[in-house]
Image (cartoon, rainbow, N blue to C red):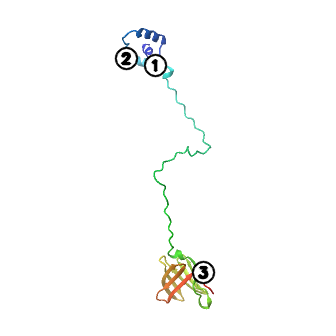
Amino acid sequence: MLALALTGCGGDDNDKKRDKGASGSTGSVQEPAKDDGEKAGAKKTASPTPSRTKKPKATASPTPARTSTPTAAATPTKPRTSAPAVPPKKTTRPATGPQSVQGTWYHVTRGSGGRLIVLTVNGTSMDMRSGTKSCPGTITSAMEIRATCMGEVGTGKATLSGGQLTFAWPGQGGNDYFRRTQPPA
């Protein structure tokens, strides 16, 4: 019981009487030596005061789901460390290769009898046609052309400039010129 009285857990009347008697003396009160058995017994029998007891932690209950959308202030933002990436500007280059000449072209002059000479390019295939006559061929990515007309094979180079498509046939009699519009009658 002496340990309880010194810690403030025992009878308060005895503490008041001791305090009055000890207040006039200059000596100090020493606690008697205890062995481990007494400490363990004292702790078991002692009833702690309400200020020394820890309150049990409340168990976490699930929070109800939020039905509203968070505001911008409630959303954490990450500080920006650098300027935003700017996509590179697309440069417009004139198309080259057969993709630049796809579709229908007309020879700048009419053929015999006033017939139109029509060139059709579809992918890497091409066909020059006048009436019932046809000259099928190919065009490569390097704009090299090859066509078969009336049993003869011709090879050359195609160039596109200013809206005009030119087929150069070296060693075979000249060039052919095509535009997107029909020539006058």
Quadrant of the image occupied by residue 185? bottom right
Query: Which residue is the site of mark 2?
Result: 35
Query: Which residue is the site of mark 3?
Result: 181
> Badges 3 and 1: C-beta atoms under 8 Å apart?
no
Query: Which residue is the site of mark 1?
Result: 44
> Badges 2 and 3: C-beta atoms under 8 Å apart?
no
Query: Could you tell me how far apart the alpha carbons at marks 1 and 2 are, in whole angstroms?
Result: 15 Å
| Residue count near mark 2 (Cα–Cα under 10 Å), binned few <14, some 14–19, many ≥20 | few
| Residue count near mark 1 (Cα–Cα under 10 Å), binned few <14, some 14–19, many ≥20 | few
- What residue sits 55% from the left and 82% below the top? 178
Residue type, label 2: Asp
Query: Could you tell me how far apart the alpha carbons at marks 2 and 3 are, in whole angstroms?
Result: 116 Å
Considering every residue shown, the one lying at the far bottom of the view is: 113
- Give the image location of residue 131, x and y in percent: 61, 87
Q: Nearer the viewer, residue 94 or 42?
A: 94
Please, what secondary structure does the residue beneath circle 3 have?
A: loop
Residue type, label 1: Lys
- Give the image location of residue 79, x and y in percent: 48, 48
Query: Could you tell me how far apart the alpha carbons at marks 3 and 1 are, in whole angstroms?
Result: 109 Å
Dot placed on the residue nearer the N-terminal end, 1 or 2: 2
- Give the image location of residue 152, x and y in percent: 51, 88
